């Protein structure tokens, strides 16, 4: 019975988060369905008992399917999109590498285990929630750790979504520069697109291309994380 409660609750949260995000998009506000789902889930799980068993079932049964579907959507040709150019191409890899390096040293400084550190680095470097979900099975992260990592990634993603357009204006960046910046640091695709649109039409196109190229890095990151998980 408790499993059914958890499964039903998770499905309802997903639907509500999607609809709310769809509604907010009409006012050019994009927090991302996953961010809203995480917030709603945290609140509802606190007030509704017996949801843990169903949540674990969703993670063990639905998450692998979601990862496979995510893989179907990856497109390596985005690395060579004309909107990105050499500057954007270099930025994608350099920011991803920088994110991993920073996470590694911060994790080492605060005595964080290597699996969680890698998951945080992947979420920040690649594509937020999707990246964390994709690498967590290979890293053998427990559900509690996955939840914490997702919370941190969503918080950081929301902050970057809000400040990148503002700082781009303050710093006087061109639309090309701002678009590359937005696409290379904002976690969720809808948020990167929305931030780029706020800056300008050209920035939106560039931010979208750069962001999608980051997502494609999962093709390389997921098997690497699986190898690391097997050796830990």
Image (cartoon, grey):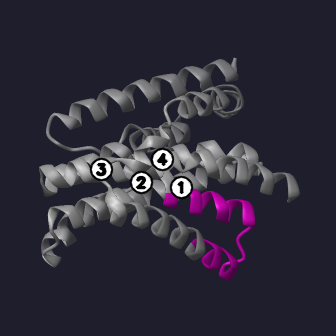
Looking at the rendered structure, the secondary structure element under dot 3 is loop
Looking at the rendered structure, the secondary structure element under dot 1 is helix
Can I make out residue 134 in this image? yes
Tell me which secondary structure the magenta stretch mostly adopts: helix
Q: Nearer the viewer, mark 3 or mark 4?
A: 3
Q: Earlier along the polypeptide chain: callout 1 or callout 4?
A: 1
Q: CA distance from mark 4 to mark 2?
A: 9 Å
Is 227 magenta? The answer is no
Q: CA distance from mark 1 to mark 4?
A: 10 Å
Discs 3, 1 touching: Cβ within 8 Å: no
Q: Earlier along the polypeptide chain: callout 2 or callout 3?
A: 3
What residue sits right under mark 2 in the picture? Answer: 187
Where residue 78 appears, as percent x and y from the top left, is: 41, 44
Q: 188 or 4, which is in the foreground? A: 188
Q: CA distance from mark 3 to mark 1?
A: 26 Å
Which region is colored magenta? Answer: 103-125
What residue sits right under mark 1 in the picture? Answer: 123
Q: CA distance from mark 2 to mark 3?
A: 22 Å
């Amino acid at each position: 019975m408790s499993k059914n409660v958890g499964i039903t609750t998770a499905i309802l949260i997903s639907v509500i988060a999607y609809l709310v995000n769809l509604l907010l998009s009409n006012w050019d506000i994009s927090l991302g369905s996953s961010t809203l789902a995480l917030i709603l889930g945290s609140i509802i799980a606190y007030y509704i008992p017996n949801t843990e068993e169903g949540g674990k079932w969703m993670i063990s049964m639905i998450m692998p399917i979601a990862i496979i579907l995510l893989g179907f959507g990856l497109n390596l040709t985005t690395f060579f999109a004309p909107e990105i150019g050499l500057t954007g191409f270099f930025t994608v890899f350099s920011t991803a590498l920088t994110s991993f390096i920073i996470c590694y040293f911060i994790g080492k400084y605060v005595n964080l285990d290597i699996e969680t550190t890698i998951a945080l680095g992947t979420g920040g470097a690649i594509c937020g929630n999707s990246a964390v979900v994709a690498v967590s099975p290979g890293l053998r992260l427990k559900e509690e750790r996955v939840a914490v990592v997702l919370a941190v990634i969503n918080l950081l993603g929301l902050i970057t979504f809000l400040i990148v357009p503002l700082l781009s204006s303050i710093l006087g960046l061109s639309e090309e520069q701002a678009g590359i910046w937005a696409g290379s640091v904002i976690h969720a695709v809808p948020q990167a697109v929305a931030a780029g649109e706020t800056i300008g039409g050209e920035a939106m196109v560039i931010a979208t291309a750069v962001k999608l190229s980051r997502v494609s890095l999962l093709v390389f990151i997921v098997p690497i994380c699986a190898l690391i998980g097997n050796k830990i």
